[in-house]
Amino acid sequence: MTNADTTKQTEEREPSKAPLIVGSVVTVGILGFIGWGIWQSLNPAPVPLQGMLDANTISVAAKIPGRISQIYLKEGDMVKPGDLVAEIGIPEISAKLEQVKAQEAAAQAKENMAQTGARVQEKEAAAADYERARAGLALAQKSFNRVDALYKEGLVSAQRHDEVSAQLAAARELTTVASAKLSAVREGAREEEKAAAKALVAQAAGGVSEVESLANESTLKSPVAGEVTRVVMKAGEVAPAGFPIVMVTDLNDTWVTFNVREEELVNLKKGEKLSATIPALNADVTLEVTWINPRGNYATWRSTRQNSGYDLRTFEVRARPTEALDGLRPGMTVVVKR
């Protein structure tokens, strides 16, 4: 037997070590993967805190119902405080305004009369009436004196005496009335009458102010600066009182709403600063926690274990950007870095 044959027989008898090494490597790899999985389950990566951007939206509505005559804005327009939004046609208000202005003018005339008293012509007429009454009284007194003297001498009848006596009494009454009228004209209205006339003027002025205020409501203006996000109604439609006609969103008044599980609230305090990113803008932003809802009623995380664990509730948390950032839109996703 040659040496080559001997070597060949030896190689056939000794098994190869390569499969054993490969198997060992695979086993170690599997064990390592299982160990890594166990470590990951025991030390899970923190779940990112995700929220949604929101902004203050104002509903521009009319205080009184009316037909929309014109809308000056369209969706996407930028507005400033005081910009015209729409016109409401309210013909009843115009008629009511004329009515209350007429009432105010009448009340003012009465008040002026009470304060200034009668005119000069009225005073002169009252004085003339009084002088005529006095002259009539003097004449009636002389006639009565003559008839009375004759009656006492038996030269006139009792009937004639009674007639001149009645004429004297009537002349006295007429003089009294004329005197009272002259005094009233000269003195003017009493203080109570002046106060009542003044109160009527104030009441009428209040009615005018009220109707003018309603008339001004026919012109709708934007109360804030922002963007028109929705035009709810169209020209020609009847707008009910308080129903929104245009929606304006103030993009400078924004906040982020997070829904945080209760075990994570320990890491959040009012006034705390949060570092976050806005994926849509690829921008970082700093947020300040401004409000944490005291009631946890948004959602409930149910325990998956029957014999242990407990349910978790979600609390609403709001945070505002500390600096202005261009391009912010309500509905954008905001992720807090952890």
Image (cartoon, rainbow, N blue to C red):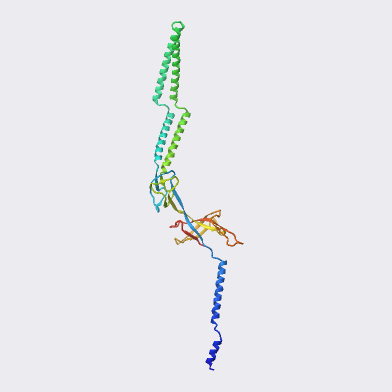
Where does residue 241 sit, x and y in percent of width and height? 44, 45
Write down the quadrant of residue 281 in the picture.
bottom left
Q: What is the residue that sits farthest to the bottom in this orientation?
A: 1
Where does residue 25 sit, x and y in percent of width and height? 54, 77
Identify the residue at image location x=43%, y=41%. 214
Where does residue 198 sit, x and y in percent of width and height? 45, 32
Q: What is the residue that sits farthest to the right in this orientation?
A: 307
Where does residue 279 sit, x and y in percent of width and height? 46, 61
Q: What is the residue that sits farthest to the front in this orientation?
A: 306
Q: How many marks?
A: 0
> Is 213 positioned to the left or the right of 48 in the image?
left
Write down the quadrant of residue 27 in the picture.
bottom right
Q: In the rendered image, which quarter contains the N terminus?
A: bottom right
Of 200 and 1, the residue lying toward us: 1
Identify the residue at image location x=55%, y=78%. 23
Of 292 and 178, the residue lying toward us: 292
Q: Is residue 185 above or below residue 1?
A: above
Identify the residue at image location x=55%, y=80%. 21
Identify the residue at image location x=54%, y=89%. 9
Q: Is residue 269 above or below residue 146?
A: below
Q: Is residue 286 above or below residue 107?
A: below
